[in-house]
Image (spheres, rainbow, N blue to C red):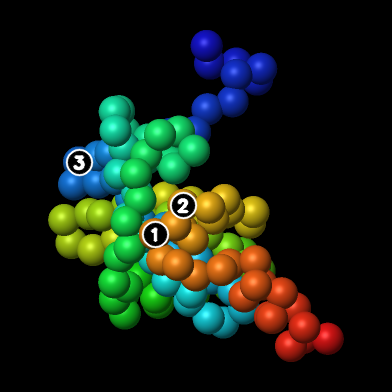
Amino acid sequence: MLGDSHPMIIQEYIKNSSGKDIRVIVVGDEILGAMMRVSNSGFKSNFHQGGSVKFLEIDEEMKNIALKASKSVGLKMAGVDLLIDSNGYKICEINSSPGYEGFELATGINVSNRILQYAISKK
């Protein structure tokens, strides 16, 4: 199993976040909002893998982490996935092409429109 033909990603298990995470959408220097994703089985909470979504009031720590994370990898549009640790949040991943159907469902925010508005403002 441990060979060049079988790449692996190993990450810390965060017990407090088992089966749930937070997705924050960033466009430019703006945080559009956040949603909580909850798995209906197992630890993966992705919306397209059967997870449920709900609106989440975003706090300053989430905003700061998401903005710094997207800027650190040079992204103008990102989905930053956060795990909930006992003493704050940890970045799970930074998506350059995040799915946002669940985010739109949870928040009512039209992400495509906001991306378009951002692109036009940079013209």
Q: Secondary structure at mark 1?
A: helix
Residue identified by numbered label 2: 102
Question: Cα distance, mark 3 to mark 2?
Answer: 24 Å
In the image, residue 15 sits, relative to residue 91, either above or below, namely above
| Along the viewing direction, whichever of 9 and 106 lies nearer the viewer | 106
In the image, residue 25 sits, relative to residue 8, either above or below, namely below
Q: Nearer the viewer, mark 1 or mark 3?
A: 1
| Along the viewing direction, whichever of 117 and 88 lies nearer the viewer | 117
Judged left or right of residue 54, residue 66 is right
In the image, residue 101 sits, relative to residue 71, either above or below, namely above
Where residue 18 sits in the image (x, y, percent)? 25, 39
Which labelled disc corresponds to residue 106? Answer: 1
Where residue 17 sits in the image (x, y, percent)? 25, 46
Q: Nearer the viewer, mark 3 or mark 2?
A: 2
Where residue 46 sits in the image (x, y, percent)? 43, 41
Judged left or right of residue 71, residue 54 is left
Where residue 60 sits in the image (x, y, percent)? 31, 79
Judged left or right of residue 84, residue 37 is right
Residue identified by numbered label 3: 15
Identify the residue at horizontal 53%, vertical 81% (top origin).
Answer: 30
Q: Secondary structure at mark 2?
A: helix
Q: Residues within 10 Å of mark 3 (few under 14, many from 20)?
A: few
| Residue type at tag 1 | Ala
Question: Cα distance, mark 2 to mark 1?
Answer: 6 Å
In the image, residue 42 sits, relative to residue 25, either above or below, namely above
Identify the residue at horizontal 23%, vertical 63% (top origin).
Answer: 88
Evaluate whether residue 73 shows in this view.
yes
- CB of mark 2 within 8 Å of CB of mark 1? yes
